[in-house]
Image: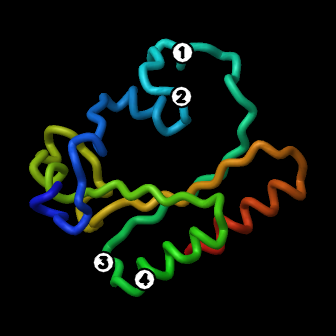
Amino acid sequence: MNETFPNLGLKQSDCTEMSWVESVLFWINFPAGTLVNILLSRVPQVLTHLKRKSDYLKNPIPKQGLEFIFKRMIELESVMITINPYRERMAEILPSEKPFPHRARNLAKLQYATNWNESGVEATEKYIWRKGRVW
């Protein structure tokens, strides 16, 4: 990471290596060290509402575009963006080994997300509106 993105100033302590299923626990905010078999439980751990939307990135986002996105995310408070890159390692895997048609002409998948614990139509509309203001 430091070779590719030296300006980030990442340290080893900033990174956590985990399996895909462990990352599921991470993204739904389970504490580090939670056993993956908790995912087998059919009882919700918390009541959370969520909305997601994905787009495919075909061209790099210019610096001004990133600045706008980050500024908007700060203003809206409850919106997150996840970027899944499709180059580098993905490009090394032959389509015959693992078919995945979305990697062909896309740089990455962007996922816009918002979660909330409030109930009711008004809360739902508020958070969905916020998510829609990012793109």
Residue 40 in the image: x percent, y percent? Answer: 55, 14
Q: Name the image quarter holding residue 87.
A: bottom left
Label 1 sits on a secondary structure element that is helix
Q: Verify CB contact (< 8 Å) between mark 2 and mark 1.
A: yes
**Residue bearing mark 3:** 59
**For residue 34, side relative to residue 63 (left or right):** right
The crowd level at tag 2 (other Cα within 10 Å; few <14, some 14-19, many 20+) is some
What whole-number distance in Å separates the C-alpha atoms at marks 3 and 1? 39 Å
**Residue bearing mark 2:** 30
Q: Name the image quarter holding residue 61.
A: bottom left
Label 4 sits on a secondary structure element that is helix
Label 3 sits on a secondary structure element that is loop
Marked residue nearer the N-terminal end (4 or 3): 3
Which label sits in the foreground, 2 or 1?
2
Label 2 sits on a secondary structure element that is loop
Residue beneath the point at 67% across and 23% down: 45
